[in-house]
Image (cartoon, rainbow, N blue to C red):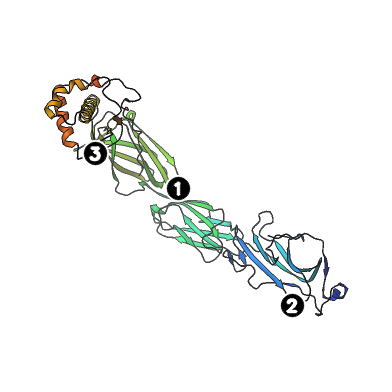
Amino acid sequence: MKMASFDISWVDSLDFCKVDHASWDSSVPGAILSENCPYGEDVKNGFIRRGATATCECDIQALTLLTGQLYWFGNEGQPVETNENGDVLNVSYNSTQGSQATFSCAFVAGLVQMGEKAVFATKFYSEPQVVNFTVNGSRSVTVKVNNSVTFYCQVEAEPPAKAVLTGSGLGKVQELTSASDVFQLTLHDLECEDSGRYFCSGRNGFEDNATSSRDYVDVNIICRQNPRFSSDAFKTLHFFTNENTLFTIEIYGFPAPQSFYLKIETRDSTHDVEQDNYSITYLHLTPPFGLVNVSIYDANTKGTTTYILGIVNEAGEFQVKIQVIKEEKSITTRIFEKQPDVDVAIGVGAGGGAALLVIVTLVVICLVKRKRDGKRSRTKLREDADTQLTPNHQDGYITPLDVNIIAGPKNTDFLQECVRDQRGHGHPTTNVGPTSAKNPKPHAPQKRAPTIPSF
């Protein structure tokens, strides 16, 4: 980039004879802007997109014998950066100078500006501002289903922007754009889904650039609360037997819920859940939405339970059925052997930790025996099983980890028979030997953090 720095004087065509330069032309060459100034991907109708950069070029107005160069100057006459030739200027929006800035281009010979300057005034799309937004002439209305409401949205910008109406709910209006800076719309036959918050904003000449800060109004349509996910709600959730039931439901409607209740449904009847056994909280979101958080203290239950959640407001009530299935917690263990690899999948229910340890011990015995005594017969393996369980038996070939693995096909038959044989000999679990860096202790099963379903 080039930055000019010098003191100059001005000469117009009448004073040309005073300049100590020779020229065969009777006029002084000035500067002229290119026809497409400004230009660039972010320019429309001479306006530059905010935050973008545009380019303007200038040239010498006429041929001349004078030796000189083109220069660009800023608002206060200070030189500005350009290309090496001085004729190309790149401009971008500057928040300190606002949307308007003036640049001038001049032909300079020696230290003298020659002829007329070319002036370039930048024009940026201004940020649209909402000047008026109402619904039925107010900031908020409360109406009934099948009523009507009228929105009036007006914005200002330079050049004129388009008014945009956006709805936050599930109703007819998601986003509508007018052809001008004023938008008037009447919604007839309102439904519960039309309830919510509506926004007015302005969109400038670049359709993807809605730049104004939005203004809003609220339309409250009296209707019962409804779950957002479906109208005939029925969900199935899975938890472990030692966990409480936790879930969240997003709902919409007006006014906000006044009360809740929880029931258990059996084959022939329903009965209330005692209030000490559950808690329900409600969180307001952007109208018309809210979150219902439910905690049921049923960690000691097993099997399948069907709960009925009742949501009550001024307009009525709605029931949601939630089927909760309590499952036994599974513990999985992976066992590695250096050569060959053996994968074993083990599942135990609640209270089955001792059984898991016995099975893991038996598998460890079988793997080590196979490594050291692969050539022995199965009969010999049975006879020597007790002598193999010494404190120094495990020498780094086996490492238990807490991961899911499926049994490898090459070792399945061997493991099944070996485990059966070891069970027949009744080896105690305490014979595996002490833990060390070489023989690490199997990791305890990780506790599962509860997941709160949301729908």
Find residue 408 and report its horizontal and vertical position in percent: 22, 39
Quarter of the figure with residue 68: bottom right
Percent across and percent down for residue 51 are 60, 57
Tell me the CA gap for discs 3 and 1. 50 Å
Residue receiving disc 3? 406
Q: Residue furthest front?
A: 375
Q: Amino acid at mark 3?
A: Ile
Mark 3 surroundings: few (<14), some (14-19) or many (≥20) residues within 10 A = few
Measured in 3D between alpha carbons, the distance from the residue under mark 1 to the one under mark 2, in whole angstroms, is 69 Å
Query: Which dot marks residue 287?
Result: 1
Taking 306 as reference, is 124 above or below it?
A: below
Residue drawn at x 56%, y 53% is 213
Q: Amino acid at mark 1?
A: Pro
Q: Earlier in the sequence, mark 1 or mark 2?
A: 2
Query: Which of the pair 137/385 is nearer the observer?
Result: 385
Mark identifier at residue 63? 2
> Percent x, y for residue 79?
75, 60
Q: Is residue 10 visible?
A: yes
Q: For the residue labelled by badge 1, is the local secondary structure a helix, a strand or a loop?
A: loop
